[in-house]
Image (cartoon, helix red, strand yellow):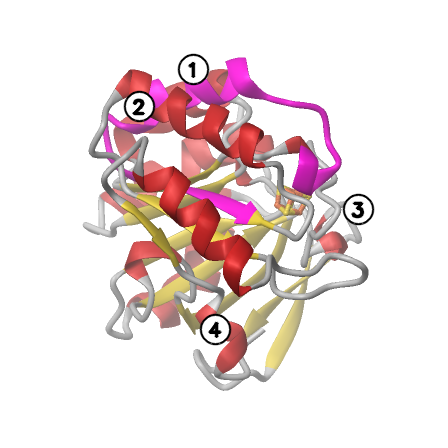
Amino acid sequence: MMSEGHVMEIFQAIQGEGPWVGISQIFFRLFRCNLRCSWCDTPESFELTGKGKVEHPPGSRSFVEFENPISPSRAMELLEPFLKTPHHSLSFTGGEPLMQKDFLLELFPLLKSKNEKIFLETGGTTPQLLEPLLPYIDYISMDIKLPSSTKERPYWKEHEEFLRLAITKDAYVKIVLTKETSSDELQMGLQLIKRLRENIPVILQPVTPIGSDQPPNETQMLKLLTQSLEILPQVRVVPQVHKLIGQK
Ligand code: SF4
């Protein structure tokens, strides 16, 4: 049976996070998320609204609405003008894109048949949903969510299982830090990564100020980085660069 997807928006943009900062991507943002991070910058993705929007033409920031849900072949039609533009990969983001695993399981093979590269941005808490999609995915940006900054419950076990699968691909881990981030929790996260492999790139991302969530100050940040480098060699601090260039 064909699975339909609830797609929030499709647009062209510059990747603003992590080791791939600066590349041109086609963003495919899906509705739904299993988490509620306190600093979430896309809460509109939580509830299905029935409508999605696609940038037309690509890169114009002018959007046309479409009705959800859509079939995988309709998604390919909407993507067609984007696929003609130069781009590094398609970034599947959300929300939590894995919440629509069945839809992606049908869409990804269509994209791979056109030699497209698939980049997954995920909260990293649902390994059972990642596993069947792995053969189609090229890059994974996986979060480790620290409860002291998300105000969510810990996901240590889920993150470990997820990372074990993710590192079969070109993967890195992103950890968002706030003023309230506990250095003990950060060390637990890094030890979890170290148990799997030492050379996994890790990005510490100071939160972009939102509501009462503020980034660590300069000395806090340096201290967290120094402590991290005592555990793992490939840790870097990279803020959300797309916000600095006025991109949402
Ligand atoms: S996982 Fe991402 S989309 Fe979901 S609540 Fe957290 S920041 Fe928001």
Q: Secondary structure at mark 2?
A: helix
Distance CA(mark 1)–CA(mark 2): 13 Å
3 or 4: tag closer to the N-terminus: 3
Q: Is residue 150 magenta?
A: yes
Part of the protein shown in magenta: 148-176
Q: Secondary structure at mark 4?
A: helix
Q: Can you identify the residue that label 2 sits on?
A: 194
Circle number at residue 47: 3
Label 1 packing within 10 angstroms: few (<14), some (14-19), many (20+): some
Q: Is residue 132 visible?
A: no
Location of residue 234 in the rendering, given as x and y in whole percent from the top left corner: 25, 43
1 or 2: tag closer to the N-terminus: 1
Distance CA(mark 2)–CA(mark 3): 36 Å
Q: Is residue 244 left or right of residue 238?
A: right
Whether tag 2 and tag 3 are in contact, CB under 8 A, the answer is no
Q: Can you identify the residue that label 4 sits on?
A: 242
Location of residue 57 in the rendering, given as x and y in whole percent from the top left corner: 46, 82
The amino acid pointed to by label 4 is: His
Label 4 packing within 10 angstroms: few (<14), some (14-19), many (20+): some
Whether tag 1 and tag 2 are in contact, CB under 8 A, the answer is no
| Number of the front mark, 3 or 4 | 4
- What residue lies at 59% left-to-right and 62% top-to-bottom? 217
The residue closer to the viewer here, 161 or 137, is 161
Distance CA(mark 4)–CA(mark 2): 29 Å
Q: Is residue 211 above or below residue 35?
A: below
2 or 3: tag closer to the N-terminus: 3
| Number of the front mark, 4 or 2 | 2
Q: Can you identify the residue that label 1 sits on?
A: 161
Q: For disc 1, does the CB lie below 8 Å from ligand 1?
A: no
Distance CA(mark 3)–CA(mark 1): 28 Å
